[in-house]
Image (cartoon, helix red, strand yellow):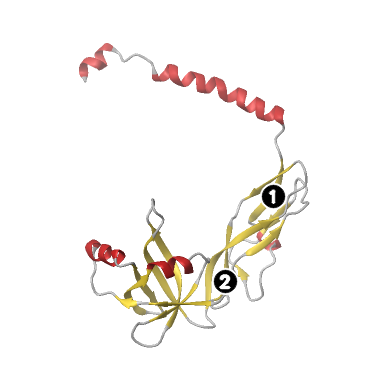
Amino acid sequence: MPEVRIKAEPRTEFGKGAARRTRRAGRVPAVIYGHGSAARHLSLPQHELMLALKTPNALLRIEGLSGRAGLALPKAVQRDPIRGVIEHVDLIEVRRGEKVTVDIPVRVSGEVFSGGLLDQQMIQIAVEAEATHIPEGIQVDVAGMEIGTAVHAKDLALPEGTTLQVDPEALVLHVLAAPTAEQIEADLGEAAPEAAEAPEAAAAPVPAEAAEGE
């Protein structure tokens, strides 16, 4: 995974007001920690950071702080629930050759056998890899998989130097029989009476004694 160079500035003001001023200036409050050193507070450019974090486990080369540039991985990212912009990020410092545990995406390609329904249980999986060689994801080709076929963690083709950090027997995905039109109709028929009973329960009159007590 290539390094993304990003210019940091030290942060000396803290609190909600200071954080808002930092964001208005187009920057994101951040903290970097790791290797037993004290946490360092900094800010990063909003636009460059958003572009970098589009890649899972982006390896950031933090420049502009005292001392030499350091490598870091995003540990926790806080986003505005409405706008989706990054509000704060925690970074963990890493070194070349160091092993780290991260979650990487499980990407599926292809179509299962006709009449089958793909049920993907894991969209990402924990692995251990060298900090500077974290795979972008694991590809699983399901083309032509028949009903009953299952893929477990141990079946995944891991990139060289990567090891699983989950139970090898953990189910990643399997192929189920797609429900027939009759089954769907039967399920809808069972749900309809329950839905019809709900308004009656909601419309039950309040006892006079309870109403007077209010």
Instruction: Give residue 102's position: percent from left, percent from top.
Output: 53, 67
Crowding at label 1, few (<14), some or many (≥20) Cα neighbours within 10 Å?
A: many
The image shows residue 123, relative to residue 175, as above or below, that is below
> Which residue is at a point 44% across and 19% down the rendered structure image?
199
Name which of mark 2 and mark 1 comes first in the sequence. 2
Residue where numbered disc 2 is placed:
128
Outermost residue toward the top in this view:
208
> Which residue is at a point 73% across and 50% down the rendered structure image?
111
Instruction: Give residue 40's position: percent from left, percent from top.
Output: 32, 76
Outermost residue toward the bottom in this view:
67
Residue where numbered disc 1 is placed:
174
> Which residue is at a point 42% across and 64% down the rendered structure image?
76
Choose between 124 and 27: the one closer to the eye: 27
Choose between 151 and 80: the one closer to the eye: 80
Q: How many marks?
A: 2
Q: Give the amino acid type for the residue marked by disc 1 in the picture.
A: His
* Left or right: 74, with 117 as reference point: left
Crowding at label 2, few (<14), some or many (≥20) Cα neighbours within 10 Å?
A: some
Disc 2 vs disc 1: Cβ atoms closer than 8 Å?
A: no
Choose between 134 and 47: the one closer to the eye: 47
Instruction: Give residue 15's position: percent from left, percent from top.
Output: 23, 64
> Which residue is at a point 61% across and 26% down the rendered structure image?
188
Quadrant (top left, top right, bottom left, bottom right) of the C terminus: top left
* Left or right: 29, with 172 as reference point: left
Q: In which quarter of the image is residue 11?
A: bottom left
The image shows residue 213, relative to residue 47, as above or below, that is above
Q: Give the amino acid type for the residue marked by disc 2 in the picture.
A: Glu
